[in-house]
Image: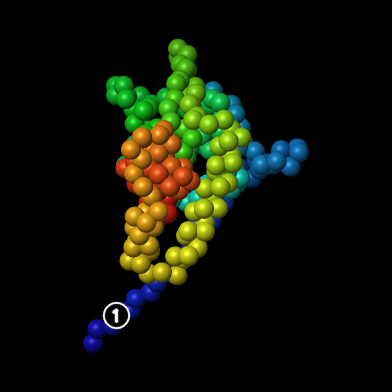
Amino acid sequence: KNDLSIGVTKSKNSPYGSFADYTLLNPYWKPYDDEGKIVKLFDDDIEFYGGFSNLPKNPLYNATLNMKQTEEYYYGKMSKDKQNVYRAMLHGLMELSDEFLIPQVPTTDGNWLYDVFFQLRLDHPEIFWAVGFKYRYYKDSPNLILIPEYIFDKNKIREHQKALGARVDKLVRTAMKFSEWDKEKYVHDFICENIRYDKLKKPYSHEIIGPLGHGVGVCEGIAKSVKVLCD
């Protein structure tokens, strides 16, 4: 006699991260500063820890960022060194930092930094405001200083974030109880019925703000919008 058992579980990832992250922390580290604000790092002694990527990070900090759990396909394909760069870059961009440190990667590939930036934005198309970057490097430093290029000023970015967040939440709420197939069809139909191709190819048409904010987009912007809705 054969027995078959099938179980299905629906769950959401906690914004506070994995419990395993907390078990590795020093019990003497304080997650809050003297003013009661969550600290990003428990210690900033780069020399002692052997580089920026090794600094002890506060897992509570991620919960303060305007981020949602997404499928990070390209992150999973990266080496550990590049994953550290990816995480530092993600945090800096989400904070709308003017510049921030990222760890150097020992490689002969001259395009490695651009590749990480490009693939991060494919994993996280909700970061619609960062379109390029410059960087500074000091001899013998284990880090680079990344200077991102934003297409809007910070106040405008926050306004667009709020509007797009409300737009996406409203669209997704309608399909929450749909089957997986019906969810995909729902996204497909929404794109076909509400987005038109932007022949003028405005800069924002390459980002989700074009299709989801203005109803126009090119292939890249439409594909990013599909990912945001599916995530």
Q: Quadrant of the C terminus?
A: bottom left
Q: Nearer the viewer, residue 108 or 201?
A: 201
- In the shown orientation, is residue 172 left or right of residue 163? left
Q: Nearer the viewer, residue 151 or 200?
A: 200
Which quarter of the picture shows residue 216?
A: top left
Which quarter of the picture shows residue 98?
A: top right
Residue at image location 56% in from the left, 33% down from the top? 96
Outermost residue, top side: 139
Residue type marked 1: Leu
Counting the numbered discs, the total is 1
Visible in this render: residue 117?
yes
Residue 38 screen position, x and y as percent? 66, 42
Q: Is residue 109 above or below residue 183?
A: above
Outermost residue, left side: 1
Q: Nearer the viewer, residue 161 or 26?
A: 161
Residue at image location 34% in from the left, 63% down from the top? 185
Residue at image location 46% in from the left, 16% down from the top? 137
Q: Nearer the viewer, residue 197 or 25?
A: 197
Visible in this render: residue 28?
no
Q: Is residue 229 above or below residue 100?
A: below
Residue 190 screen position, x and y as percent? 39, 57
List the residue tagged with mark 1.
4
- In the shown orientation, is residue 61 left or right of residue 220? right
